[in-house]
Image (cartoon, rainbow, N blue to C red):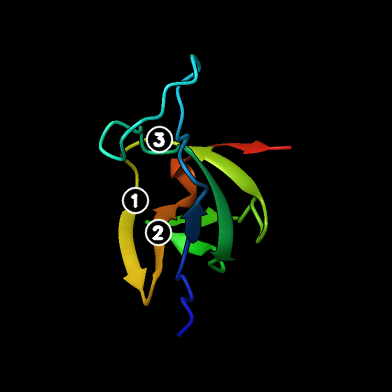
């Protein structure tokens, strides 16, 4: 199954959270922070959203930083994805 986002939506897959603290202590999964860096796996076509023209400025494969609480989580098979609006993306990591 494949996700095809609509409008200004972007499908992300989060990179793994840190398993150790900066001091080298192993963290339980409940103590790990939700990662804020994700990789884009699909991008919508853009177009008119809420009466405004939206041009997609990100592409598949980009690594991005986004707000901690942005998006909707979706699980397909064993894979977890998050769908966000392009405006929820704060920066592209180069």
- Residue at which label 2 appears: 83
- Residue 14 in the image, given as x and y percentages of width and height: 48, 50
Query: What is the number of the mark on residue 7?
Result: none
Look at 49% across and 76% down and name the residue there.
Answer: 4
Q: Cα distance, mark 3 to mark 2?
A: 12 Å
Rendering quarter of residue 80? bottom left
Identify the secondary structure beneath mark 2.
Answer: strand
Task: Write the residue at 58% across / 57% down.
Answer: 40
Residue 90 image position (x, y, % from top left): 52, 34
Q: Which residue is mark 1?
A: 71
Q: Which mark is residue 67?
A: 3
How crowded is the residue under tag 3: few (<14 C-alpha within 10 Å), some, or many (20+)? Answer: some
58 versus 24 height, above or below = below
Cα separation, mark 1 vs mark 3, equals 9 Å
- First reached walking from the N terminus: tag 3 or tag 2: 3
Q: Quadrant of the N terminus?
A: bottom left
CB contact under 8 Å: marks 1 and 2 = yes
């Amino acid at each position: 199954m494949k996700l095809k986002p609509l409008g200004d939506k972007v499908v992300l897959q989060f990179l793994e959270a840190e398993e150790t603290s900066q001091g080298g202590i192993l963290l339980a999964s409940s103590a790990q922070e939700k990662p804020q860096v994700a990789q884009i796996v699909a991008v919508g076509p853009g177009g008119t959203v809420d009466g405004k023209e939206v041009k997609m400025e990100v592409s598949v494969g980009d690594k991005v930083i986004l707000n901690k609480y942005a998006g909707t989580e979706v699980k397909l098979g064993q894979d977890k994805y998050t769908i966000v609006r392009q405006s929820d993306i704060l920066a592209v990591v180069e």
